[in-house]
Amino acid sequence: MNVLLTGGAGYVGSHVARALAAAGHTPVVYDNLANGHRASAGQAAFVQGDVADGPALLAAMRDHSIEAVVHLAAFIEAGESVVKPDKYFRNNTIIGMTLLDAMREAGVAKMVFSSTAAVYGTPRRACIEETDRLEPINPYGASKLCVELMLAGYAGAYGMGFAALRYFNVAGADPTGGIGEDHNPETHLIPLVLQVPLGKRASIKIFGQDYDTPDGTCIRDYIHVCDLAAAHVLAIGAIEPSRVKVYNLGNGEGFSVMAVIEACRAVTGEAIDAEPADRRPGDPPRLVASSRKAIAELGWQPKYPDLETIVSHAWAWHKSNPDGYGDR
Ligand code: UFG
């Protein structure tokens, strides 16, 4: 299948493009390079364009005979979304309609949407199921939930088919090399912790040590980016007309910020200084997925579920690419 990936030159997008190609599909990367890296698209077809640009999207879909879209382009920082909600609702939500309308015009009826665990807000139980309440506590989560609701409308009215994948905390890098995480600025925990042994920062700040968790720090469910990418390939095959299928993607196990720092110490063999800091606005104390539905319905089976493997693949990427893509 010819698949257009918006945000395909980003961290997750580059891994999804590689997984699609390995499964015999033809990925076409569509990215404005605001945060993506041209080099991460490798040999895949590349179109530099913005999701806000409907005519450019339509042309890309027609030129490449696109049959499905993976929509990854988005701003992704929950903390920033609290102080800049306009940026998140405009880019992540309103612009999403431009893409849906271009798809309708081009006759492209399938989309995998990159959604987030942030749609749940502060969960009411230990392991979150897809049917749990959707009560985002930051504009980032709300901006993604709005798109999920739009998808339901488009599925019902126009017969389009969707899979919405609710990512938990994505980390690691393709162990075969060449692609990995490179955000500027970096805000995610694992790459930031690894900057300490790389000599790029003196210590890691722990945002909040007074949460209602066993060691007082926030708990997250870390998923290997290659396992996440594999789920996109399966999801494309599972899309049905007039339906929105929703799947959590995590490993069902929570690790505190302290536990992640410990895992980074074990993998790198370095001491890694950590210092207490204030809570970061918009952070729920604990987010852990039940991914039973993805396992049962998609046949998804994570290859790298353990945290040390995830960290060691991230470490291999950062060690060989200390400046990321160096803006290639
Ligand atoms: N953290 C620190 N110090 C840091 C950076 C992060 O203590 O320097 C903490 C955060 O406060 C949080 C945890 O580490 O408790 C994880 O933070 P990340 O920024 O790595 O990830 P988030 O959980 O905020 O968000 C990520 C994605 C979102 C997604 C969410 C789902 O960025 O897109 O996971 O869980 F919605």
Image (spheres, rainbow, N blue to C red):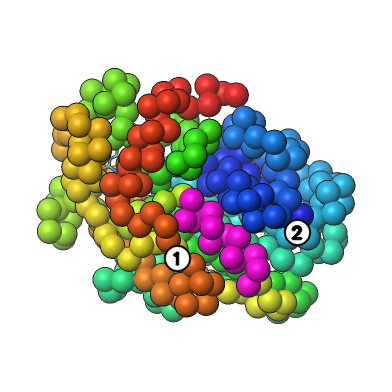
- Residue 152 placed where, x, y %? 64, 74
Location of the C terminus by quadrant is top right
Residue 144 belongs to magenta span: no
Residue 153's image quarter? bottom right
Seen at 33% across and 40% down, the residue is: 312
296 up-or-down from 284: above or below: below
36 up-or-down from 12: above or below: above
Q: What residue type is labelled 2?
A: Met
Secondary element type, mark 2: loop
- Residue 296 placed where, x, y %? 47, 77
Seen at 64% across and 31% down, the residue is: 38
What is the number of the mark on residue 1? Answer: 2
What is the number of the mark on residue 301? Answer: 1
Q: What residue type is labelled 1?
A: Gln
Q: Give the range drawn in magenta.
A: 226-238
Q: Which of 142 and 214 is in front in this view?
A: 214
**Is any part of residue 127 visible from this angle?**
yes
What is the number of the mark on residue 79? Answer: none
Location of the N terminus by quadrant is bottom right
Secondary element type, mark 1: loop
